[in-house]
Amino acid sequence: MTQHDNSYKLLFSHPEMVRDLLSGFVNEPWLAELDLTTLEKVNGSYVTDDLRDREDDIIWRVSFKGRWLYLYILLEFQSSIDAHMAVRILTYLGLLYQDLIKQKSIPADQKLPPILPIVLYNGKARWRAATDIQQLIEDTPTGLSDYIPRMKYLLLDEGAIDESGAWELKNLVAALFKLEKSGTPAGMEQVVSALIDWLGAQEQISLRRAFVIWIKRVLLPGRMPGVSLPDLGGLLEIKTMLAETVVEWTEQWKQQGLQQGLQEGRQEGHQQGLQQGKLEGEIAVLERLITKRFGPLTAATKVRLQNANLEQLEIWSDRFLDSPTLAALFDEH
């Protein structure tokens, strides 16, 4: 697992985060029937059909009408989008059911519990993969469709989510998403200040520490690569550091932006130089050819060549041998 995956897994190993994920970002009517105070983490390790051990993502269960609803949270932080995510999810749910049966967590005379599969994705590109397994299967003859698997997963694409409403309700997952999207020290400081206020209780020490670990190891290094960070023991120290260095960081970001702009300018200038050189070369070739075949160039012809673009010059060069007159070359009929 990457540092980001591990940090997120640590955060969502706390019931408060799972509760706020459901209450803030799952807009389903049946959510009101869940007893979120009963959230209970389930640990599992499964063996896939190629016999490789796979440490599961995050599994919770919550009381639902006197029985359990399982929550399967898959963290997806890869740079590329998995077009067959629905197949992966279907496999993992099958492994979870298989494990519950093996452990005899479900009496033989009872049905299997429902599972809500959630894919939490934070990539830059918006998610476009199918969220329903049936979208990946070709059309089938009448009658055969009864045997096609049915399974959808709930996609939470952080970049496409508006967390402002949940933020107003002091939602911890909304704070996480805002930190992910924050582009300035001032913006991060605002969210960290809120977390200090929201996570002040003694029993929330572990969750506070999980946020600190993620901010120190993932968020800040990602925002300021190569910058030596001071020892940050907690959220208060992070807030203080952000407040004290906001001017310095802003200037550094500006300088980085200036350097990037200069580099891009140089590259653009180089490309423009190559383009200009090719343009001048085409003009020189045509001037020599026209002079040799049709005599000295008139002032109007010189202006016409100088004002032409590269595409037009290449057309005239290709047409030169077949043109009996200068007017025909320029397609003047």
Image: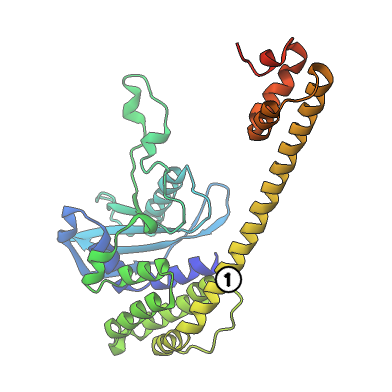
Q: Position of residue 178 (x, y in %)?
A: 36, 69
Asked if one can make out residue 320 in the rendered structure from this viewpoint, the answer is yes
Q: Nearer the viewer, residue 24 or 105?
A: 24
Residue closest to the far front: 299
Residue at image point 39% right, 78% down: 186
Count of labels shown?
1
Q: Nearer the viewer, residue 303 or 8?
A: 303
**Helix, strand or loop at mark 1:** helix
Q: Quadrant of residue 67?
A: bottom left
Q: Is residue 243 above or below residue 219?
A: below
Q: Position of residue 142 (x, y in %)?
A: 32, 19
Residue at image point 39% right, 57% down: 159
**The C terminus, quarter of image:** top right
Asked if one can make out residue 224 in the rendered structure from this viewpoint, the answer is no
Q: Quadrant of residue 266?
A: bottom right
Q: Is residue 188 above or below residue 101?
A: below
- Type of amino acid at the residue the image marks with label 1: Gln
Q: Which residue is mark 1?
A: 256
Residue at image point 24% right, 51% down: 110
Q: Position of residue 299 (x, y in %)?
A: 70, 29
Q: Position of residue 238 (x, y in %)?
A: 43, 85
Q: Nearer the viewer, residue 71 or 44?
A: 71
How dense is the environment of label 1, judged by Cα within 10 Å: few (below 14), some, or many (20 and up)? few
Q: Could you tell whether 169 is left or right of 217 in the image?
A: left
Q: Is residue 188 above or below residue 271?
A: below
Residue at image point 42% right, 27% down: 138
Residue closest to the far right: 292
Q: Could you tell whether 226 is left or right of 142 in the image?
A: right
**The N terminus, quarter of image:** bottom right
